[in-house]
Image (cartoon, rainbow, N blue to C red):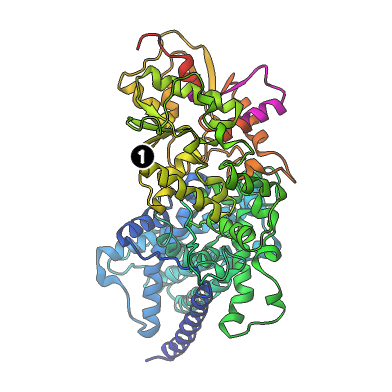
Amino acid sequence: MELKNIIFILFFLVSILFFIWSCRNLVHYMLVAKKKDNRFDKIGERLKRVWVIAFAQTKLLRDPKAGILHLIIFWGFILFLFAVIEAIIQGFYSPFTLSFTGMLYSATTFIQDIFSVLVIASCLYALYRRFILHIPRLEVDKTGKLDATFILVMIILVCVFMLGENISLVARQNFILGEYEVRPVSQYFAGILYSSPGGANSFYEFFWWAHIVVIFGFLNYLPYSKHLHVLTSVPNTFFANLEEKRTLKPINLEDETLEAYGAADIEQLSWKQILDGYSCTECGRCTDSCPAATVGKSLSPRKIIVDIRRRTKDKAPLLVNGVTSGEVFEKTLVHDYISDMELWECTTCMACVQECPVMIEHVDSIVDMRRNLVLTESQFHPNLSNVFKSLETNFTPWAFNHADRANWAEGLGIKTMAEDSNCEVLFWVGCAGSYDDRYKKVSRAFSTLMQKADVNFRILGFEEKCNGDTARRLGNEYIAQMLIQENIGTLNRYGVKKIVTSCPHCFHSLNNEYKQFGGNYEVKHHTQFINELIDEGRIKLKDESAGTKATYHDSCYLGRYNDVYDPPRELLNNINGFDLVEMERNRSKGFCCGAGGGRMFLEDEEGGKINVERTKEALGTGADTIASACPFCMTMLNDGVKHLEKSGEVSVKDIAEIVLENLSIEV
């Protein structure tokens, strides 16, 4: 054994032990969080998710330029593992090579050479984007910039030293490649940088040691860097929520051991939410897509997650070491790190979750903190007092008389379930469809369509209550569960199996979240249902040209939450002479109207108006009609059109109204 091997073994042991100690601390800090969260089910599905999201980088590739850049760096590092393993084993036994793997060695040496150049170029371009182009979402504080720069420089050094090692190796071998070696880049530069094998050995040893030191230095820096995601992004993707229909986890309100509802500090979060904090790359994709941040409000989804990590770093080490008092304990995550205003500005549109390349669940953490404000601290906007009171007494967010819930249907001859429960489908009207003057017209239009199609449907009338979505997203899980359980009792009493609704919020709750409480129903959105009626020939569109240019606004709860993008567009495209033009932000990249997450009932206290931002985009298409499929979206877009003084030029219509206008007399 040479002196080199002895020094390496000591260096290796110190580096690995320090790395293990750092990781052990991170795990202990993560387990400070006490909220139960089982993420160890469906291993096969989780592994598939890891391959698609983490290794194939599909989310990053939604932004092709940055995605390809990161893909090269990521796979470069994966492929460099062979070189790292070879170098580490050489530290124990100098003559070792992986050449015994034959053609695999040929492939790895070739790929390492090519990817070294590609990764260096990608890192330099990443620095160019950050410091010359100043990409807005990459703008962070001074510490963040230094950290990003340090990491990118470290990656460049890893590649440079690895190339230097291989170039010197080729020269040391008298410019003859070893068996199965394929190193085109190294061989080319060896001929330029060395005139003879003499001296190449010294340079080889220098580059070998430099490569080893940078690799282990990089490894031990990661647990203390925002680039900790290099270690945690794959586990975070593995443990991500498998539900494609994004639901909130219920609180067990009957659990007498709960000392508080929601999360005021890191102890009330789950280990996965702490892992989210570890995994944040601060890439800014979440904030870049956030409607609140876009119009200049305080909310930044990136900041929310970074603040969770920052609070964990400040408090968890003390808790782990048994410290329970001091200046740090005089603060809390909510209020001191994350302001109340930030939490209330979220529309729960899920754009942040959709765009996050490492599967962070921002909305769950925001709602958990809202739950603390509402249920534990009773600190919320005065407007919400009226909303919660109305939900408890009138079973709607608005102060309408519950007995008037079915007044919209007067003169249409629609039966209630109480009158006759023998029906094909239940029409769940929703609060807006029952009380809002504009959306009552949509309820009547959709009912007329069903009547023309001879659909045997019923409504619940005053037995229907708010689905609970508004209360739940605002953090009032108590009222939400009360409404959900009462509605399930009513639906099950009538033996309801199939439901159709024109409200995406009702659709999402009834179809996905009611299952958490024993309510299992087949639920259709009215755009899906109307499509089926046309496909079955129960209604027919007229042949005359509509002569309309329209754009369609994707509802967040219909699109991102439930992946319903095509049915509304299919309906509009099937109308003769209907010119459908897309807004720039559409489908999964659609921009929120600003009403979700209970924001419908809160005023804008700072920044611009989300609905005006979206309406400007709609008007920019030159459309004379803005088509929507959600009562909240319709209200917000109508307000936007009025604000921009375009009411006389552009109309906002629900798809049911548009279909009814273009219905053939012959059925």
- Front one among 187 and 552: 552
Q: Does the magenta portion include 663?
A: no
What's the residue type where badge 1 is placed?
A: Tyr
Q: x and y percent of residue 428 in the render? A: 45, 35
Above or below residue 91? Residue 477 is: above
Question: To which quarter of the image does residue 621 belong?
Answer: top right
- Front one among 467 and 573: 467
In the rendered structure, the answer to whether residue 540 lies left or right of residue 299 reads left
- Front one among 174 and 358: 358
Residue 349 at least partly seen? no
Q: x and y percent of residue 225 in the render? A: 58, 69
The quadrant of the picture occupied by the N terminus is: bottom left
Question: To which quarter of the image does residue 584 belong?
Answer: top right
Residue 78 at least partly seen? yes
Above or below residue 237? Residue 455 is: above
Tell me which segment is drawn in magenta.
637-656
Q: x and y percent of residue 477 in the render? A: 54, 55
In the rendered structure, the answer to whether residue 431 lies left or right of residue 243 reads right
Q: x and y percent of residue 73 in the render? A: 48, 58
- Residue placed at 32% from the left, 75% from the top? 97
Question: To which quarter of the image does residue 449 belong?
Answer: top left
The quadrant of the picture occupied by the C terminus is: top left
Which element type, helix, strand or loop, lies under badge 1? loop
Crowding around mark 1 (Cα neighbors within 10 Å: few <14, some 14 to 19, many 20+) is some
How many numbered circles are shown? 1
For mark 1, what is the residue? Answer: 494
Q: Does the magenta portion include 651?
A: yes
